Amino acid sequence: MGKPQKKLSHGLAYLVYRLAETALTIPPMWFCYRTGQLIGLICYYLLKRYRNLAEHNVSIAFANEKSVPEIKQLVREHFITIGANFVCSAKLATVSPNKINNYVEYEGLKLLQENAEKGIPIIYIACHMGAWELLAQINSPVPNVKQSTLYQALSNPYIDAHVLRKRKRTGIKAFDRKDGFNAPMAHLRTGGSLGILVDQNAGYRGIWCPLFGKLASTSNLAPLMAARSGATMFPYFVITLGPSKWKVIVSEPLEVSPDEAIETTTARMNLLVENMVSRSPKDWFWLHNRWKTPKTRFLIEKYRRGFCLPPNIKIDELKPFNILIIAPRSEDHCKISAQTVRLIAGGRPDAKITVLGNHSKVWKNVTEIKKFIERPEQVKDLHIHHGSISDQTFDVAILFDNSLQAAKEAKREGIPHIVGYSNNENDRFIDHKITQENSLDEPAYYNKIAESIGSRMP
């Protein structure tokens, strides 16, 4: 799209946005809330992909506490709640900051006031919970502390500028992430506050820390800025109380010790995120793929920041990262690939390896394998109860056998990420394609697979 067309497209989108915003000034807040609930309920039934994603994420967090029907009910409530909050957030942007207080209750403000009396800057650890945009619309919870936030600019410059103008009406200063961190750091050092959303996937740049017991890539930005500025980090989030009523909550602070590694502080921060989410699970944004598997390097031993556990969690307590390896067909190739399986198993502390194949005598000597499943002779027999791969959920499948049948087996089981060598037959089933350079009679054939997913080569 050329510049004139792009400018026109942005202009039209901005016009539609402003018309919708103007229309929302007419109905009362309760009507917006009920309308949003209906929209959320419709989306729950229509958007199967997102419903499945939400159920998957809720299962990671609460499988040990909630039954399957309870998980499904929570996801339904989540869609209804997020629909209501989405519409009401747009409505709240049209309401003056003073009138917004008619819809909001507060909890824990005394903690902020006591901190401000000491002249210590504040970092708000925020989550995508409830009507989270509300936090940018209300006046500073501590009147004598100038508030600010980090934000990522919207792709539409007209809408972005309008949103920034709305936020500035409460005196909030918005710092664009792409402009660096010198300005927000200077703001903190003068005793101000800074809001940072800490519950997003940080990709390859993050530290892998447990969130509800499963490793998730987590940004260390908030702990790092707190350590460098001397700021106190406070959990700061919104929950939905009912129609047109929200509560802004401040919880006990996360102390930053000069003797503690930033990685450990980041891991402890995720425990606070768990507490926030557990306060009102229907309010957290479960439609974000928080435990997303990286497209290529999902083994994390070579990551610069690596992984870190909080003091109260041990490695064997982590929820596993389940890897299915579909073994080669011949016994000789199984023997050649066994060392590569060991490399993959050592690639992340939560790895749990299941091998689907034949020649069990070869695999019983590979102690890193947690489970071996005898491969059925016919594809139609794959779902038999005894030793079926359907009995468990896998995060990834790795095809040491790059046949079309193996790729179909992995896809049929709904495994979300499939790794293998690319060929004309199986390309449409593979998510991470590798170009073949070596013969499968060589260890290098299998080692290249391990290297491409992040394994450290010997």
Image (cartoon, rainbow, N blue to C red):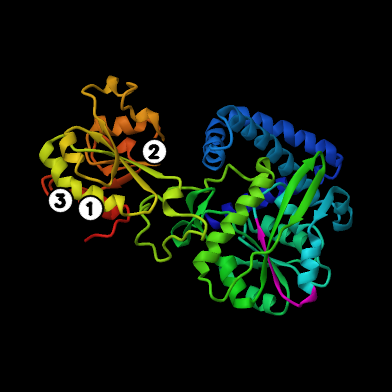
In this rendering, is residue 53 above or below 179? above
| Residue drawn at x 66%, y 78% as measured from the top left | 186
* Residue position marked by numbered label 3 in the rendering: 443
Q: Residues within 10 Å of mark 1 (few under 14, many from 20)?
A: many
For residue 320, above or below residue 167: above
Three-letter residue code for mark 3: Pro
**Residues marked 2 and 3 touching at CB (< 8 Å):** no
What segment carries the magenta color? 117-126
Number of marks in the rendered image: 3
Name the residue nearer the viewer: 253 or 127: 253
Q: Residues within 10 Å of mark 3 (few under 14, many from 20)?
A: some
Residue ID at (16%, 41%):
334
Q: Nearer the viewer, mark 2 or mark 1?
A: 2
Is 222 placed left or right of 418 in the picture?
Answer: right
Q: Position of residue 366 (x, y in %)?
A: 22, 45
Is 254 or 169 nearer to us in this picture?
Answer: 254
Q: Earlier in the sequence, mark 1 or mark 3?
A: 3
Between residues 367 and 108, which one lies in front from this camera angle?
Answer: 367
Side of 147 where 152 appears, left or right:
left
Cα distance, mark 1 to mark 3?
9 Å
Q: Is residue 196 left or right of residue 108?
A: left
Q: Horizontal and vertical percent for residue 436?
A: 20, 48
**Residue matched to label 1:** 448
Reply yes or no: does residue 454 show up in magenta. Answer: no
Give the residue displayed 29% in from the left and 51% down from the top: 344
From what the image shows, is residue 389 above or below residue 175? above
Residue type at mark 2: give it. Answer: Phe
Task: Specify the amino acid type for callout 1.
Answer: Lys
The residue under label 2 is 394
Secondary structure category for the residue under label 1: helix
Instruction: Residue 85: give x, y in percent of width and height.
Output: 73, 43
| Residue 285, position as x, y percentages in the image | 62, 45
